[in-house]
Image (spheres, rainbow, N blue to C red):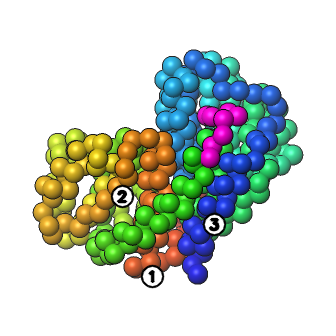
């Protein structure tokens, strides 16, 4: 079995374990209601930041998500900052926490596999660490288990002590829905450019798709909502020499705009729809897990294992010196 598929096969166990275990917290903390909130992440954690901004929206005066690069423009005095990262020793974390400290913001690091060094740094910068007692072993260039565990932690922060039984089966249900649609995904085998068109339900699924497809070099990707796509971005499907396809992410039952896009596209343009039944948080999470499986389908059709992608030497340099 390919390593990425092995990651996907294991997300259900990780998801259930983190959702059902109590949080491990470095010091007493809470997400204070009424503060502006910004969730920050990069790579595969960026989609989890989008999820966090969505599920905590009702608890804040406004919420947003961004990468560490833009953090300085989003962190307001007295706001809540969620730094979401699989590895809390990452230099991006310290950059964000220092800004939060200087602006007297409430900083919470949502991370995995907590260490003593992590605790001392958080204490020095007056920040909290939220993690799980569940050890998460996520390997490969494009992980699935780590962002799954981080998303489960975000749900626990959002719902507190409330039971989360309604979410436990989502990874399994998403896998079954993917299998039922798997033959349609073959139409994307030969595309080199993918336009991800999403509604609000498919927002963090689209963010995740962009990350995984770009970081595995499977396709160039753009994200748009249906209205902006119809405003003129559809012309990019006609780029000479470029085989383009479309992925619709969201609910056709709740948002007819996605259906109108699908109906208007010429038949020669490959189009698949990660379709969910409604507009609930459960539907959004279903869409997100199905996006992970879509990457597996596209990669498998090209003989690529996303977990086995190797960074170039100059790519490593960009990573270290960003």
Q: Secondary structure at mark 1?
A: loop
Kindly identify the residue that appears in the image at 12 percent across and 63 percent down. 266
The residue singled out by tag 3 in the image is 10
Q: Earlier in the sequence, mark 2 or mark 3?
A: 3
Q: Can the viewer see residue 183?
A: yes
Give the class, few, some or many, for how many residues have Cα within 10 Å of label 3's Cα (few <14, many ≥20).
some
Q: Judge left or right: residue 86 versus residue 279.
A: right
Return the residue at label 1.
303
Residue 51 lies in the magenta stretch: no
Q: Nearer the viewer, residue 92 or 160?
A: 160
Q: How many residues crowd around disc 2 within 10 Å: few (fewer than 14), some, or many (20 or more)?
A: many
Q: Which residues are magenta?
A: 157-165
Q: CA distance from mark 2 to mark 1?
A: 22 Å
Residue 67 visible in rendering? no
Image position, residue 160 (x, y; %): 68, 33
**Residue under the image location 19 percent in, 71 percent down:** 241
The quarter of the displayed image where residue 214 is located: bottom left
Question: Cβ–Cβ below 8 Å for labels 1 and 3?
Answer: no
Residue for point 62% across, 30% down: 81
How much space separates mark 1 and mark 3, taking CA atoms? 21 Å
The disc, 1 or 3, on the residue closer to the chain's N-terminal end is 3
- 132 w.r.t. 303: above or below: above
Q: Nearer the viewer, residue 256 or 43?
A: 256
| Residue 274 disc label | 2
Check the image and report above or below for 185 versus 273: below
């Amino acid at each position: 079995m390919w390593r990425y598929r092995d990651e996907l096969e294991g997300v259900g166990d990780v998801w259930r374990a983190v959702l059902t275990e109590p949080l491990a917290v470095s010091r007493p903390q809470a997400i204070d209601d009424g503060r502006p909130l910004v969730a920050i992440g990069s790579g595969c954690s960026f989609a989890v930041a989008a999820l966090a901004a969505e599920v905590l929206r009702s608890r804040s005066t406004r919420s947003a998500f961004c990468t560490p690069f833009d953090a300085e423009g989003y962190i307001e005095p007295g706001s809540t900052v969620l730094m979401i990262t699989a590895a809390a020793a990452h230099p991006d974390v310290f950059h964000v926490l220092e800004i939060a400290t200087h602006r007297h913001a409430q900083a919470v690091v949502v991370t995995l596999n907590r260490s003593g060094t992590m605790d001392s740094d958080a204490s020095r910068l007056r920040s909290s660490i939220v993690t799980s007692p569940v050890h998460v072993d996520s390997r490969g260039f494009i992980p699935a288990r780590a962002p799954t565990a981080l998303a489960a932690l975000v749900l626990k922060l959002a719902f507190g002590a409330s039971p989360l039984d309604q979410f436990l089966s989502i990874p399994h249900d998403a896998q079954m829905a993917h299998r039922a649609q798997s033959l349609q995904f073959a139409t994307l085998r030969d595309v080199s450019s993918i336009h991800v068109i999403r509604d609000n339900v498919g927002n963090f699924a689209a963010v995740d798709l962009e990350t995984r497809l770009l970081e595995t070099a499977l396709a160039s990707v753009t994200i748009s909502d249906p209205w902006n796509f119809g405003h003129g971005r559809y012309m990019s499907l006609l780029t000479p020499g470029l085989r383009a396809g479309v992925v619709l992410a969201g609910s056709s039952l709740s948002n007819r705009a996605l259906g109108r896009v699908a109906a208007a596209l010429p038949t020669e343009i490959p189009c698949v729809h990660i379709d969910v039944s409604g507009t609930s948080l459960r539907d959004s999470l279903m869409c997100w897990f199905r996006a992970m499986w879509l990457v597996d389908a596209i990669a498998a059709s090209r003989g690529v294992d996303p977990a086995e992608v190797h960074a170039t030497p100059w790519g490593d340099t960009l990573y270290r010196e960003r």
